[in-house]
Amino acid sequence: MSRHPKKVALAYSGGLDTSIIIPWLRENYGSDVVAVCGDVGQGSEELAGLEQKALASGACEVYVEDLREEFVREYVWPMVRSGAVYEHKYLLGTSIARPLLAKLQVRVALESGCDALAHGATGKGNDQVRFELTYKALAPHLPVIAPWREWDIVSREDAVDYAKRHQVPIQQSKEKIYSRDANLWHISHEGAELEDPANEPGPAVWTLTADPASAPAGGAHVSIEFEAGTPVGLDGERMSPASVVEALNTLGREHGIGRIDLVENRFVGMKSRGCYETPGGTILMAAHAELEALTLDRATQHYKQKLAIDYAELVYDGKWFTPLREAMDGFVDVTQRHVTGRVVVSLCQGRIAPVSRTSPYSLYAPEIASFTMGSEYDQRDAEGFINLTGLPIRVHAAVQGGLREAEGGSE
């Protein structure tokens, strides 16, 4: 950076890393710091006193904006409709929030006259990529300061020491250090004993969901309504996007839904281990898949499953503000036109099972699918279909048989 910026917009969460970045930026760059925080549903406990804490740490301005409805409507719902799941398990809770938080940060930076952006992501993680790719898409002229790639702090223990020396209030300690990220969609847990994949997650890791083994044995049912692939209500009541997720989080939490323990491949090239809790999201993804099974034709459903892998990777890699994501959404929009209906699922001690699926666009035809013979399906047609499908198999077998006879004859 050719010159020190006068005013820096910092993506601020109030956690360990971003808390110490405020005094560090003032000391090392001599810059005023604008702390920017988006409320994406991380909870009142995390947001309580955040503005006062940022100001006490040295920030000159603090912006906290409620993004919960926008987060679900514009980011989570498109992801749900796509069916995106990263590496078979991860529902992308942290990944999907980063583009929105970075977008807010850029807007505040431009409106408040900042001449640089900063974030607290480490040089080993995915978040640095997610934040900075959004910066490049929305404010490519603003330089970026990433303290973890500059300072001599090399561990969270060092960060705790730095916070104590600068009298920055923090919740973490050296004895029990977890890195957590929470929003309406999920909470993630990393660090401490989880850094060794041989270690079982201790009871202190899980904070959002009940232990499935101790959840109510009777379970519960919930009815989820979709319009064009988008969840619009529960149990017959229409609800806002954030309210749908909040209600399902409460229900899923009680029944131990949505825990995963994952060794994942980071975008930056290394493996990491994290534990995630996504109660409402797990229910929604399962219900949406059931409705698609009822309303999509075979070719479209199978092709969409392939695209879902790429969509998940795109979200994980932070490439939200790209032409490719817009193009993928175009395909998804077409596939979701008839994904309208109701799905009832049962929840019991960590398990989800479909109970009922109904849709005015159902492609399930009982008169065809039934074992009872009828006029809608002439079973004699199957013989020609099988013969044509099996033709290349039969030709291959004949050739192989001829080769085997030739080889046997040469002996």
Image (tube, rainbow, N blue to C red):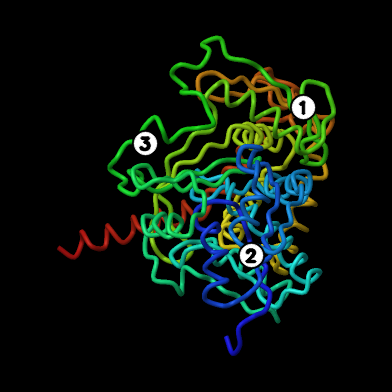
- Label 3 vs 2, first from the N-terminus: 2
Depicted 186 relative to depicted 131: above or below: above
The residue at 58%/26% (across/down) is 253
Residue 367 image offset from top left, x and y in percent: 76, 23
Depicted 309 relative to depicted 324: above or below: above
Task: Pick the residue in front: 51 or 290.
Answer: 51
Residue 27 image offset from top left, x and y in percent: 53, 73
Residue 368 image offset from top left, x and y in percent: 73, 27
Find residue 8 and report its image quarter: bottom right
The mark found on residue 201 in the picture is 3
Q: Is mark 2 on a helix, strand or loop?
A: strand
Image quadrant holding the C terminus, namely: bottom left
Asked whether the residues under the numbered discs 1 and 2 touch, taking CB atoms below 8 Å apart as contact, a structural biologist would say no
Q: Mark 1 points at which residue?
A: 342
Residue 313 image offset from top left, x and y in percent: 56, 58
Depicted 47 relative to depicted 33: above or below: above
Q: What residue type is labelled 2?
A: Leu
Tell me the mark number nearer the camera, choosing from 3 and 2. 2
Count the marks: 3
- Label 1 vs 2, first from the N-terminus: 2
Depicted 216 relative to depicted 164: above or below: above
Image quadrant holding the N terminus, namely: bottom right
Q: Name the residue under label 2.
A: 10
Tell me the mark number nearer the camera, choosing from 1 and 3. 3
| Gap between marks 3 and 2 measured at Cα | 32 Å
| Gap between marks 1 and 2 measured at Cα | 43 Å
Q: Which residue in the rendered view is the most extreme toward the top?
A: 218
Q: What element carries label 3?
A: loop
Disc 2 residue crowd, few under 14, some 14–19, many 20+, Cα 10 Å: many
Tell me the mark number nearer the camera, choosing from 1 and 2. 2
